[in-house]
Image (spheres, grey):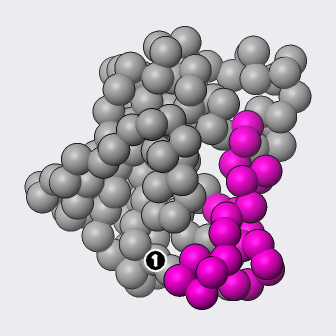
Amino acid sequence: MRAILRDPRHMARVDAVMLLDGMHTSYVPEGQVLAAGGVLDTANLASLTEFARASVRGEKRMLIAHSEIFPGTYASTTETADRTIQSLGLRRTPVLEWGPRGMQQLSAVRIGRFEVLGFAGTTAPDHIDQLHAMRELLSRLLER
């Protein structure tokens, strides 16, 4: 998705983006996690952040859903979502409620047509729950 959005012609044609536990980037230096002094490779997030900005303005629609899985060798979806939220000058709101398909929602950001939903879970089944919830999440995206 980020490669598609890098091209301004494609960016103009895409109306909505939904990322289900799938926004990743590398650490710099490679493999050095944030806790050990690494930083995120933000070049890989630039086109997604630009799309998020447009969705905050109401020009596009974007929904990012993520679990708490920590891959260790590359940035997690939580870390990349946090970076995107920070880049937009926004903050998460703590939430404790049931999400689609019984997922436990822990946080949310909603402004304009931009939304980030943080869910509990650190296992492979938690990752797959995002896929199973695609119908409900897509419906939510299209409502905004």
* Residue 16 position in % (x across, y down): 57, 26
Please tell me which residue is depicted at 33% across the width and 44% down the height of the picture.
91
**Circle 1 residues within 10 Å: few <14, some 14–19, many ≥20:** some
Query: Does any portion of residue 138 appear in the rendered image?
Result: no
Within the image, what quadrant is residue 40 found in? Answer: bottom right
Q: Secondary structure at mark 1?
A: loop
Image location of residue 59, percent across then percent down: 55, 12
Which residue is located at x 60 percent, y 87 percent?
36
The quadrant in which the C terminus is found is top left
Location of residue 118 by image quarter: bottom left
Q: Residue at x 73, y 37 (%)?
A: 47
The residue segment tinted magenta is 24-47
Q: Report the front residue among 126 and 45.
A: 45
For disc 1, the marked residue is 69
Q: Amino acid at mark 1?
A: Ile
Q: Position of residue 109 (x, y in %)?
A: 32, 40
x and y percent of residue 87 in the render?
55, 42
